[in-house]
Image (cartoon, rainbow, N blue to C red):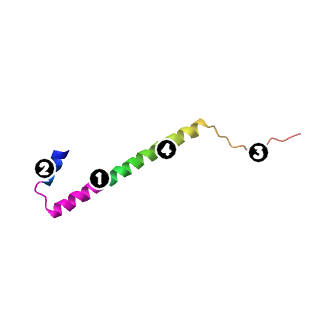
Amino acid sequence: MSRALDEITEDMTLYHGVRLSQVLEAVYTQGKKDGARTAFEELDKKIREVHKAVPHKNPGKPKKTK
């Protein structure tokens, strides 16, 4: 990783340095979003499993007493 960064920054101008920092920031931000998306998908999956595990029936009308 270090060698690749050295190759990229070898002939870097200020413009290219700013562009590189913007790209790295965008990659970092997208990684955070992907991590959050994964976490929320896991939560949704577990909630669906819990809904299936707990049977729910509407009570309906009470039975008439004689």
* 58 shown above or below 13: above
Q: What residue type is labelled 4?
A: Leu
Mark 4–mark 3 distance (CA, rounded to whole Å): 35 Å
Q: What residue type is labelled 1?
A: Val
Q: Which of 48 and 2 is in front in this view?
A: 2
Mark 3–mark 1 distance (CA, rounded to whole Å): 57 Å
- Quarter of the image with the N terminus in it: top left
Point out residue 12 in the picture as x, y percentages from the top left corner. 13, 58
| Residue beneath disc 3 | 61
Q: Which of marks 3 and 1 is in front?
A: 1
Disc 2 to disc 3: CB gap under 8 Å: no
| Residue beneath disc 1 | 27
Pick whichever of labels 2 and 4 is earlier in the sequence. Answer: 2
Q: Which amino acid does label 2 sit on?
A: Glu
Q: Residues within 10 Å of mark 2 (few under 14, many from 20)?
A: few
Q: What element carries label 3?
A: loop
Q: Check if residue 11 falls in the magenta segment.
A: yes
Pick whichever of labels 4 and 1 is earlier in the sequence. Answer: 1
The disc placed on residue 43 is 4
Q: Is residue 10 left or right of residue 45?
A: left
Residue found 15% across the figure and 50% down from its top: 6
* 30 shown above or below 55: below
What count of labels does the image hold? 4
Report the predominant secondary structure element of the magenta stretch: helix
Pick whichever of labels 2 and 3 is earlier in the sequence. Answer: 2
Pick whichever of labels 3 and 1 is earlier in the sequence. Answer: 1
Point out residue 34 in the picture as x, y percentages from the top left corner. 37, 48
Q: In this view, does 50 lie to the left or right of 29?
A: right
